[in-house]
Image (cartoon, coloured by chain):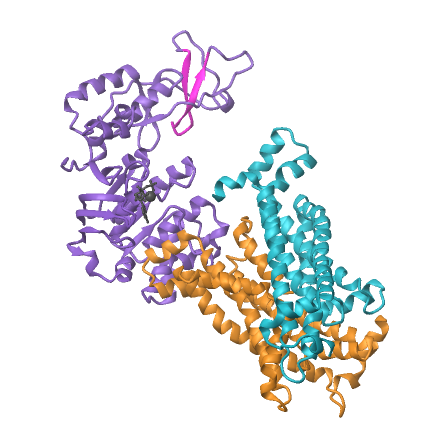
Amino acid sequence: MIGEVFTWLNDPGHWKDTRFDTGIATQLTAHVRFCAFALLVALIIALPLGLVIGHTGRGRWLIAAANTLRALPTVGVLVLLTVVIAPHFYGRTDTGYLIPTEIVLIVLAIPSILSNTFAGVENVDPAVRDAAEGMGMTGKQVLLKVELPCSLPLIFSGFRSATLQVIATATIASYLPLGGLGRFIYDGLAQQDFPQMIGGGVLVAGLALVADLLLYLVQRYTVSRGLTGRFSKKRIPDARLASVTQAEVAAV
Amino acid sequence: MTALATSSSSSPLHFWGYFMDHRSTDLSWLWSHTWLSVVPVVIGLLVALPLGWLARRYRFVYPPLISLTGLIYTIPSIALFVLIPPLFGLKSLDPKQVPIALTLYSIALLVRVVADGLASVSEDTVQAATAIGFKPLGRFFRVELPIAVPVITAGLRVALVANVSIVAVSGTIGMSNLGQLFTLGFQNSTNGPYYPPIVLGIVLCVLLALVLDRIVIILNILLTPWRKAVRS
Amino acid sequence: MIRFESVSKRYPDGTVAVDELDFVAPSGQITVLVGPSGCGKTTSLRMINRMIEPTAGRILIDDQDVTKVDAAQLRRGIGYVIQHAGLFPHRTIIDNVASVPYLLGTDKKQARARAMELIERVGLDPRFAKRYPSQLSGGQQQRVGVARALAADPPVMLMDEPFSAVDPVVRDQLQEEFLRLQSDLGKTIVFVTHDIDEAIKLGDQVAVLRVGGHLAQLATPAELLSRPVDEFVAGFVGRDRGYRALTFTTVGELAVHDEQTVTLGAPVPSGADLDNWILVVDAANVPQGWLNLVELSRDDTTVSADLLYRGGTLATQGGSLREALDACLSSPSGRGVVVDSDETLLGSITAAEVLALIEKRRPAAASVTGSGSERR
Ligand SMILES: Nc1ncnc2c1ncn2[C@@H]1O[C@H](COP(=O)(O)OP(=O)(O)OP(=O)(O)O)[C@@H](O)[C@H]1O
Ligand SMILES: [Mg+2]
């Protein structure tokens, strides 16, 4: 079986588009494109929101509300939005499926980024914040020069979970007839073409690993070495751990 | 089309009527969904306890263990489902592939939670326990583990809630659980939206997640009576 | 000069943290606020840089009402040091120190050069400049905190228990260095502590607060020890205040006796005219310890370092009576060793002689050192 999967993946014909089939290259680009779009929108919404809530301490209920969204079954919401929205776009190929998918992806990415950003700002040592104010930083300077850089490790962990979650959910979106790497899994399943189905799984797993690795590298070069804990003997406090694990689990 | 024949309304609010019309199927799906959500977490915890203890006891075990579990966590659920059969020598679409994948996820999450939970026990407490004569094993079960309970239960809650959602995903590749309700709803929506099974599926999944979450919270309170003073 | 004019602070929950506080912290001096926990020290301090706004009264810095200045501007001109330093974990030490100059828009290169200078000035190894706070010990972090507060050369410094989170030995070092720095810089400093010893050691004047934020006494350390205004201050100042007050009493020249000595490494002396105890010095005539001639065995023919009793403290000529008395009490021979400012031996003095000096001083108890500001 593994050999067949390898053959399927290695066949250059499967990578290029043909008259009947869309190739791996095209589906991969599509997958990356709609994941990137959703993540960008989620980041634009959740990052400033989390920073402001953490800085002012006002609007905490939003964090709790966002976290309860995690109890929703992804597939269910995806199907629900699709049957609501898709009929309005009849005949216009993918748009009817793309819009509900993007909405779901954005809604799913927000809680991880939002709650981790909030936790990051809130976990900044009060003495550090006090010192920053005491030396004459304005509220905005405290937020941008101290709280934001100090929260980066947690913000990154939230964004990385959001990314994994979005990649995973985008795959499931192929269950509704949308493009992306999930196509191979669900088409393979429908046609009982298991090498194709498993090959699709390999591709999705590969994409997730590469995306996470890239983000890890970005994190490594943007987060101050003073924070990465390579020197510090302190362990992560539990409050933070809870939110980290929460964010991590959401990645599935 | 049988669904349409027996359920007259396609209104989202009709999900209760839909449930009453298809009680036996829906209940069996709910049942298997519950099992699939809970059992892997229990197995995961049983495996994670000794592994987490190892990672705590021998510090050099921690980094590779965390990297490995992180790797498992990075793989999207649907991809892990289809990758399990070739890796474990099962035939494709074996019903065992879902619980295996979920168990792997649960282990991956809980190893880390157990290790970090044990690490949250202060060094002073551990040394005090050793000083009053606990042997390593007794100290682990009577001192370190109880203190780590709040962190571990936090991890269990997260794992259970996540599992409920992932089990539904396996419905899309034909496994029988509440995920089937979404497939049904989608297939029956070709001529205009047919909401009842979709809404029913979401409602049951959320309820299941909330109930399981509650149970763990209660368990945590029962296991850590000394925290009551702080809580109130 | 910082002037408190009937300043009160009532928190929204009704707690009165500071009540009608009136005092002046003179320019170029260290004013210490001391008192039991919760007496409003931190609140008083933080009202100066407007981290907390008073509910009544005014605070003037050089006759300028602080509430009339933009808060951020005001704070950039005031150094602020807190208990756990509050260093920015994401910045290197040098960038931490240069924080305020960066805020003020100072050129980066210039700010760093100045920061480097300060790092050395507070007694840190320049190698630390490129490290991060998590790589430093608590005492080192605290030094960085002081350097950071000094970076923009503010005339005023506020310090809230800056040395209380470090162990006693490091605290002593930090205090000594702080005094040395201050004698160079002459800042106007308000210093908060709950430790009366620290207050007495560091303060040019000490304000004792009692719970509820009332000023109990404002006085020089010596005056505080010799004339506490009431039971509360007396109790707070402590039991051995009489002994501690000797810290502030100097006697000019101590009349010392010559002391017989032997040099380290020389043969063990013998002779009937010798006392049981003989003082050992090194080649430069710096005292090393006492040798007990009675205890020596036959094999001990030369004076080696491992035979010495080193428990005695040394009194410096021109130092305080406390030092002189301590040298006598701690010396195994009962004779206190007096040295010159370059640590070379001058001679010895006995406890009885020091006590006689103390007796002689008593009528003139007011002849204390310090600037002798008026008691309220
Ligand atoms: N934000 C606040 N709200 C209400 N009460 C406060 C607040 N901050 C301080 N207090 C109260 O005001 C009083 C004075 O507090 P402050 O922090 O000034 O004491 P302190 O002298 O610095 O004590 P410590 O030595 O313990 O630091 C205390 O009773 C404290 O409980
Ligand atoms: Mg205080």
On-image quarter of the C terminus of chain C: top left
Q: Colour of chain A?
A: orange
Instruction: Give residue A123's position: percent from left, percent from top.
Output: 47, 55
For this view, does C17 lie left or right of residue A11?
Answer: left
Q: Which residue appears at 36% of the width and 48% of the height?
A: C82
Is any part of residue A167 visible from this angle?
Answer: no
Q: Which residue appears at 86% of the width and 71% of the height?
A: A1
The part of the chain drawn in magenta is: C276-293
Badge count: 0
For this view, does C23 lie left or right of residue C171?
Answer: left
Question: Along the line of sight, which residue is nearer the eye, A243 or B224?
Answer: B224
Quadrant in which residue C311 is drawn = top left
Q: Colour of chain B?
A: cyan
Residue C286 painted magenta:
yes
Q: Which residue appears at 75% of the width and 84% of the height?
A: A15
Q: Which chain is purple?
A: C
Instruction: Give residue C119's position: percent from left, percent from top.
Output: 39, 52
